[in-house]
Structures are given as structure tokens and as C-alpha cells.
Amino acid sequence: MMRIYLIGYMGSGKSTLGKKLAKYAGLQFVDMDHYLEERNYKTIPQIFAEEGEAEFRKKERKALEELSEFSDVVIATGGGAPCFFDNVHLMNRTGKTIYLNIDPGILADRLMESKTERPLIKGKSKKELIHFIDETLKKRNEFYSQAHYQITDPDTGLDEILKMIERD
């Protein structure tokens, strides 16, 4: 039984890597944001707008509790998911956590090009975005750094990632 949680800032590649890693390892893939949207019949921007961040985080926790029961799965979490309640501990207890620690400049470039609507960064210039990412990472790193593993190279190979996990 394997359960892998990918954590990191929005735009770090959790969903992209998660899909590839799941296919490569013969596991199912779940994007936690999509799972949340399907369970609530609303997009994440709608939940934020209609119910606020606090209510969104409660829904996110419930989704994480459900996903922590799945077997043989790679889960791409939302960027803030590890930073609320005891979510990072839940993930560490029930699976292997991998922090995609990507440079803020790369994150800003990816987010500027992204077609996904992201309520927390809407309307920011690249310079404002890099500053926002830096400030947010300072707060989130205490949670992200609790992951079992960390990847800093966006080009890390899938077999390298699996070997890293299987060594334990």
C-alpha cells in the first residue's frame, strides 16, 4: 500500500508531477483541488468568494481526511493544505510527503502563464507576485519543511523520486 502526498506552493508542479508519477508507478492520481470541487459542486474560487477562506479550509481538511483513506495513490494537495489544522501531521502519519521546493522566480513565471484562476494572486504584477510568493513561503516553510522528502530540481526524474521513497 502506497500513499504519496505532493505538497508545495501553487505552480510548483504538484498536479503535473503527480499525474506522471502515478502513471509511472501504477498508482491512481487524485488532484485534491478537483476532488474538493467535485465534492462541493463549486469551483475553489466560488467557495472562496461565497464562503470565505476559513470555510474553504474546513472543507479542504475534510477532503484530506477522506483522501488519507485511499490506497495506492498519489495526491496533489492544495498549496495551503499542509499549513492548516494538523494537516501536515495527518499526511506524514498516513503516507509519504514530498515537498516540491521550487524557486520563487520559476513559480512566478509559471503562475503568470497559468490559465487556472487562483484567488490569492489575482491581479498581481510579476514583481508583486514574486514578493507575495517570498512572503507566503516564509510563513509556509515551517509546514512544508516537515515533509519526509524535498525536491528542489524541477527536472528530477520519476525513477529517482521513487527510489528516494523506497529507500526507507
Image (cartoon, rainbow, N blue to C red):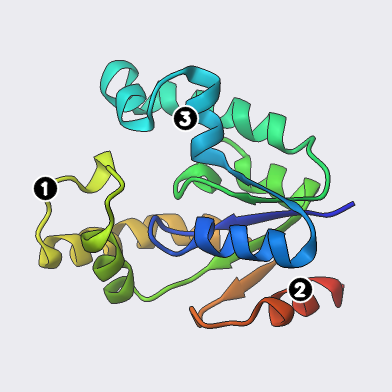
Q: Specify few, some or many for label 3: CA neighbours under 10 Å numbering under 14, 14-19, or 20 or more.
A: some
**What whole-number distance in Å separates the C-alpha atoms at marks 3 and 2?**
30 Å
Instruction: Give residue 96's quadrant in the image.
Output: bottom right
**What whole-number distance in Å separates the C-alpha atoms at marks 1 and 3?**
23 Å
Q: Secondary structure at mark 1?
A: loop
Residue to which mark 2 is pinned: 162
Q: Nearer the viewer, mark 1 or mark 3?
A: 1
27, 44: nearer the viewer: 27
* Residue in the picture at 67% in, 70% down: 149
Left or right: 2, with 114 as reference point: right
Q: Secondary structure at mark 2?
A: helix
Q: Are marks 3 and 2 in contact (CB under 8 Å)?
A: no
> Relative to residue 17, is residue 50 depicted above or below?
above
Return the residue found at the far right.
1
**What whole-number distance in Å separates the C-alpha atoms at marks 1 and 2?**
38 Å
Q: Specify few, some or many for label 2: CA neighbours under 10 Å numbering under 14, 14-19, or 20 or more.
A: few
Q: Secondary structure at mark 3?
A: helix
Q: Which mark is residue 123?
A: 1
Left or right: 64, with 82 as reference point: right
Residue to which mark 3 is pinned: 57
Q: Which mark is residue 46?
A: none
